């Protein structure tokens, strides 16, 4: 499973990869050249731009297995570690609503903890 891609079920495949710490630092996706590298990485996995720029939840059914199969091989060509992107994790789903990955919650809590505190607040008042 692709648990190493943050908020994958809420973003596009391109956005999830772009904001993954490992890919962002290796490809420098905040630069134009890094964006080009990321697009070429996805195209080299035979994923059409229409698919990787669209919602992950609406990817063509053939794309997801292709992504999982080709990721380890293509990561070597781009100096990426496939194990960072494909670790074991767990997800939660209630009835037929959206599924939430454990990593999504970790990212949300990390963002909340990193927010600056308002003056006069301490741990007892939160």
Image (tube, grey):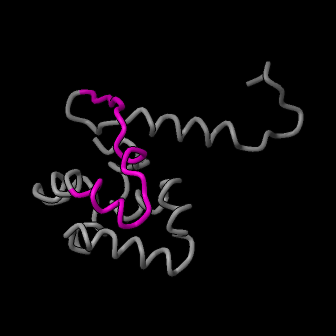
Q: Can residue 65 be seen in this view?
A: yes
Q: Is residue 57 magenta?
A: no
Pick the quarter of the image with the N terminus: top left
Pick the quarter of the image with the C terminus: top right
Q: Which of 65 and 109 is in front in this view?
A: 65
Picture residue at 43% right of the left edge, 58% below the top? 80
Q: What stretch is highlighted in magenta?
A: 70-94
Where's residue 109, x and y in %? 58, 35
Q: Does the magenta stretch include residue 91?
A: yes
Where's residue 42, x and y in %? 30, 68
Q: Which of 53 and 88 is in front in this view?
A: 88
Q: Nearer the viewer, residue 48 or 27?
A: 27
Q: In which quarter of the image is residue 43?
A: bottom left
**Residue that protrudes farthest toward the right in the picture:** 120
Picture residue at 34% right of the left edge, 76% below the top? 40
Picture residue at 19% right of the left edge, 52% below the top? 69
Q: In which quarter of the image is residue 47?
A: bottom left
Picture residue at 54% right of the left edge, 40% below the top? 108
Relative side of 104 to 86, left or right: right
Q: Nearer the viewer, residue 94 or 108?
A: 108
Where's residue 44, x and y in %? 26, 72
Up-down relation of residue 86 to residue 63 (above or below)? above
């Amino acid at each position: 499973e692709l648990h190493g891609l943050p908020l994958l079920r809420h973003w596009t495949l391109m956005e999830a990869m772009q904001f993954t710490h490992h890919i962002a630092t290796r490809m420098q996706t905040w630069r134009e050249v890094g964006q080009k590298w990321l697009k070429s990485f996805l195209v080299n996995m035979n994923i059409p731009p229409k698919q990787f720029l669209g919602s992950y939840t609406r990817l063509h059914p053939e794309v997801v297995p292709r992504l999982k199969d080709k990721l380890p091989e293509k990561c070597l060509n781009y100096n990426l570690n496939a194990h960072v992107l494909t670790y074991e994790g767990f997800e939660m789903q209630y009835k037929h609503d959206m599924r939430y990955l454990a990593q999504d919650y970790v990212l949300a809590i990390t963002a909340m903890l990193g927010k600056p505190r308002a003056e006069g607040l301490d741990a007892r008042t939160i």
